Image (cartoon, rainbow, N blue to C red):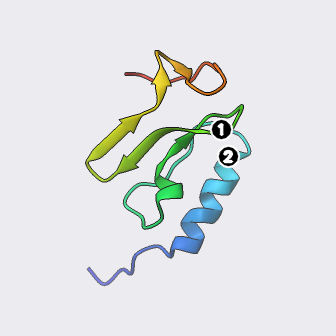
Amino acid sequence: MDISPTPIKSLIRAKEIAEEKLDYVYLGNVEGQEYRNTYCPNCKEEVISRNYNVVQINLDGKKCSNCGQEIKVIL
């Protein structure tokens, strides 16, 4: 295929636009750990870390382990 990858700046801008309406937006298969993770919409702490095939979940049940905010996630 002769199609270039979407520029990271475009992906980041799309993420920013989506975050205006959605709480849980992340980018997959990109450099920059901060773009691949999920953050609590209340306290902004990282609740799900993604590093390609490795996922670390920092939740207490379905709540943010930092502030107790319910995180809408399917485990």
Q: Secondary structure at mark 2?
A: helix
Q: Are marks 1 and 2 in contact (CB under 8 Å)?
A: yes
Q: Within the image, what quadrant is residue 67 found in?
A: top right
Find disc 2 in the rendering and name its residue: 19
Instruction: Identify the residue shown where x is 47% and y is 58%.
Output: 33
Q: Position of residue 46 (x, y in %)?
A: 55, 41
Q: Secondary structure at mark 1?
A: loop
- Spot the residue most to the top: 61
Q: Is residue 47 above or below residue 51?
A: above
Q: Is residue 70 left or right of residue 37?
A: right
**Front in this rendered view, residue 24 or 53:** 53
Which quadrant holds the C terminus? Answer: top left
Number of numbered tags placed on the structure image: 2
Q: Is residue 6 above or below residue 53?
A: below
Q: Residues within 10 Å of mark 2 (few under 14, many from 20)?
A: some
Q: Residues within 10 Å of mark 1 (few under 14, many from 20)?
A: few
Q: Is residue 6 above or below residue 33?
A: below
Q: Is residue 16 left or right of residue 48?
A: right
Which quadrant holds the N terminus? Answer: bottom left
- Spot the residue most to the front: 66
Q: Position of residue 4 (x, y in %)?
A: 39, 81
The three-letter code of the residue at mark 2 reads Glu
Q: Is residue 30 left or right of residue 40?
A: left
Between the C-alphas of marks 1 and 2, the distance is 5 Å
Q: Is residue 7 above or below residue 38?
A: below
Instruction: Identify the residue shown where x is 67% and y is 40%.
Output: 44
